[in-house]
Amino acid sequence: MKMHTMIKTGLLVLLIFACGRMSAQSADNIAMEYLRTVGDQTTIYYGSLQLGRPQTVNHPYLVAEQYTAARLSFRGVVYPEVRLRLDLERDKLIILSPNGSNIVLVSKDLDYAVLHGRHIVYLDNDVLPTGHYTVLHSGNTTVLKRQTAILTYRQVPPSGMERRFMFRTTFYLYKDGVYHMVRNQRGLLRILYPHQRALRQFISANNLNYRRHTEELITRTIIEYEKLSK
């Protein structure tokens, strides 16, 4: 029996068990309605429920707290339109089920997600911090962006507590089989030997500033590097 069939059957058993005192006909009707609603997507809605958190000043999600239409590839199956959000504090991708539940997807089973126009993957290796990454560019050199949120606390007179998320962004390059953390423009250019001078001129000509345009500068510089390396 295929895994998704086993999961679907297991969920149905739980559903019918929960209906214990209903008539057989009523339980059958509920089960059929469940299958009609969820269809063949049962496996992506099989996971733990997202835990709640205390009230905070801001939210810890990628771009928006609200669920957004997204494309998901999970266990080799592509779902062209689901509702997702990425929790940057807990590093969890959450899917909204047909009945309105917040389901945590199993990270290791994620192939990719396209959320807010960003290509999201989950990496688990011995080099990078395990977690979700945005792929900014994928060519001879890959550009990765890692975003995390940390919950901070601050006393607010006279006796209150303010909870606020602070965010951190880190960029990585995967070049010639090696991962490099990019800390600043000088470090970026050091990795891109032997075209440092040409790339420095490219950055200046396009009025790119590392602090103000970090993502754009790194991505465009890598694309230019690949052109110069042909």
Image: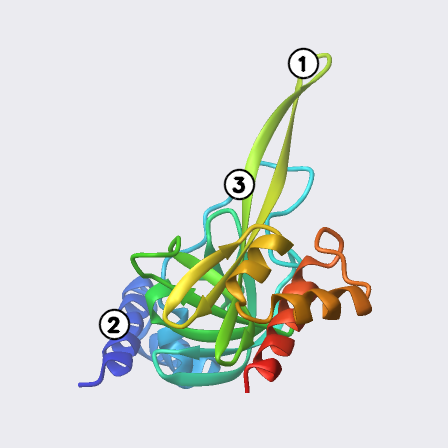
Marks 3/2: CA–CA distance? 30 Å
Identify the residue at horizontal 57%, vertical 59% (top origin): 188
Binning the other alpha carbons within 10 Å of mark 2 as few (below 14), some (14 to 19) or many (20 upward) gives: few
Residue 60 in the figure: left or right of residue 39: right
Q: Quadrant of residue 175?
A: bottom left
Q: Are marks 3 and 1 in contact (CB under 8 Å)?
A: no
**Residue bearing the label numbered 1:** 159
Residue kind at label 3, given as amino acid type: Arg
Residue kind at label 2, given as amino acid type: Gly
Task: Name the secondary structure under disc 2.
Answer: helix
Q: Tell me residue 229's x, y (percent).
A: 55, 82
Identify the residue at horizontal 41%, vertical 65% (top origin): 122
- Is residue 47 at least partly visible in the picture? yes
Q: Tell me residue 142's x, y (percent).
A: 50, 72
Residue 95's place in the image compared with 230, above or below, is above
Q: Are marks 3 and 2 in contact (CB under 8 Å)?
A: no
**Residue bearing the label numbered 3:** 53
Residue kind at label 1, given as amino acid type: Ser
Q: Tell me residue 5's x, y (percent).
A: 26, 82
Q: Which mark is residue 195?
A: none
Residue 70's place in the image compared with 160, above or below, is below
Residue 19 in the figure: left or right of residue 181: left
**Residue bearing the label numbered 2:** 10
Quadrant location, the C terminus: bottom right
Residue 178 in the figure: left or right of residue 201: left
Task: Name the secondary structure under disc 3.
Answer: loop
- Which one is in front, 227 or 44? 227
Quadrant location, the N terminus: bottom left
